[in-house]
Image (tube, rainbow, N blue to C red):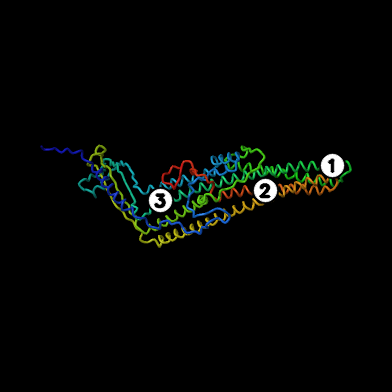
Amino acid sequence: MATKSVSGPAIPRPVQVLRALGAGLAALASLAGCDPVGPNYVRPEATVPARFVEAGPWKEAVPQDSIARGDWWIIFGDPTLNGLQAEAVRRNPDLKAVAARVLQAQAIAGISKSYMYPEIQVGGLAQRFANNSNFAVLVDPATVTANTATITDGFKAVPLYSTWEIDFWGRIRRQMEAAMAELGASIAAYQVALLTLNGEIAQTYFELRTTDELQRVIAENIALRRGTFELVRVRRADGLSSDVALLEAETALRTIEAQAPPLEAQRSRLVHKLAVLTGSTPETLTIGKEPYRPAIPAIPVGLPSDLLQRRPDIARAERELVAYNARIGVAVAAYFPTIQLTSAVGFESFALSTLTQPTSNIWGIGLSLFQSLFNSGRTTLNVERTRAAYEEQVALYQALLLKSFQEVENALAGLRHLGQQARLQQIAVTSASNTAGLASQRFQQGLVSMLDVLTAQRAVLASRTIAVQITNDQLMTTVALIKALGGGWQDRAQQAPEGLRTTWAPPLKQ
């Protein structure tokens, strides 16, 4: 039995061209998949201590800032501090600016990736023109008509253009690598800003509470000095004390009263600073005074040995190293020619009615190659510049590592010595308080002078003030240690700027 072949409708020629062009592009893409020129990134060598001198193990760092900084301030157990931190993360304008820079870096990374694909443009053209008869003589003398002009029907075209740079040498891939590294660096910079903001709020808040405690100490001493003054005044009326003793007691009272206003002014400044840090106007934030007996938390420095790995400034520095290394490849690629593939397909006709007919099909394809033959050594100098810039960043990265070790060691040593100082100072406070009580009793018995009483009271004030300052130093140093270790230690998702939508960014959990 004979079979009859049934063929489908004829495929328009432009479609055939596009199919052939697609196959060619796929073949060229496979050719362009060779390794890009320029060096691949290798982490630079750095001297890393085996452990901290003060405490805790240590091992070589790799960027792990995708691990959560964590709400580390919770360990201080202060609800007011917790609320201030939450407000700051939500409303601080400086943090919002850094977050916006992350989104900019994300867009730049997307733009860099887009150059890996062809760029397609579509356009339309409609034109109507006339030829002067004198010009027609030069073209076709048979068409000459004296002193007349020939009006030609309008020209119409609907072309579709495509251009694509074939990334044989990896220039575009190196640019994308640099942009991706910069995106990672900007995310780490956001974490640096967040950690800095959290630390500044904590330290400012602790300074505020220290001021409150100093005010309480001053108020108690004012009451004590006032009681002493009244006692001396009564004894003077009874003839048991002299005018000199009364003047000494009044001088001591007025002197300590004069210390109260500066503390109140300092407190106002600290509240205003907290307001600005939390994105509020100074008059809108009110923090009440309350008794403050902070407990210095124990930081688990030696438990998770990878705490220092999570320092966001180190992660940012290394990702910037990756970007600078990739730019060397971009510079080296300038030694090689730029290859571009261009194509066009569409319709053109002098009549709108025939524009879409098969006879109006147009297409074209071309390959261009451009190479700089002479630019006075500009390419070589640019390669040397990028290599020197990379070496500069390596030195800065190594310096940052050394600085990070120093910061942790300083904080650990500071906490150890402050702990010893706090214990000794508490003994001094107890001793001074006992001495003042004994001096007051002996004064009432007429065994010591008013000068002895005032001296003992001044010693109590000084020792208590020093004790409050030591506690403040312990809190400040604890925050400094947490910052030096890169933040908290809870294994939770990284805090990233809102609106980060990339799927090709460095490790990031949302």
The residue lying at 21 percent from left, 48 percent from top is 141
Q: Position of residue 18 (x, y in %)?
A: 27, 45
Q: Position of residue 183 (x, y in %)?
A: 45, 48
User: Hey, what amino acid is under mark 2?
Assistant: Gln
Q: Secondary structure at mark 1?
A: helix
Give yes or no for contact between labels 3 and 2 (Cβ–Cβ under 8 Å): no
Q: Report whether residue 134 is seen.
A: no
User: Hey, what amino acid is under mark 3?
Assistant: Met
Label 3: how many Cα within 10 Å (few below 14, some 14–19, many 20+): many
Disc 1 target residue: 233
Give yes or no for contact between labels 3 and 1 (Cβ–Cβ under 8 Å): no
Disc 3 target residue: 176
Q: CA distance from mark 2 to mark 1?
A: 34 Å
Q: CA distance from mark 3 to mark 1?
A: 84 Å
Label 2: how many Cα within 10 Å (few below 14, some 14–19, many 20+): some
Disc 2 target residue: 469
Lateral position of residue 401 relative to residue 424, left or right = left
Q: Secondary structure at mark 3?
A: helix
Lateral position of residue 124 relative to residue 290, left or right = left
Question: Residue furthest toward the left?
Answer: 1
Q: Which quadrant of the view contains residue 228? A: top right
Chain-order first, disc 3 or disc 1: 3
Chain-order first, disc 3 or disc 2: 3
The answer to which of 80 and 294 lies nearer the viewer is 294
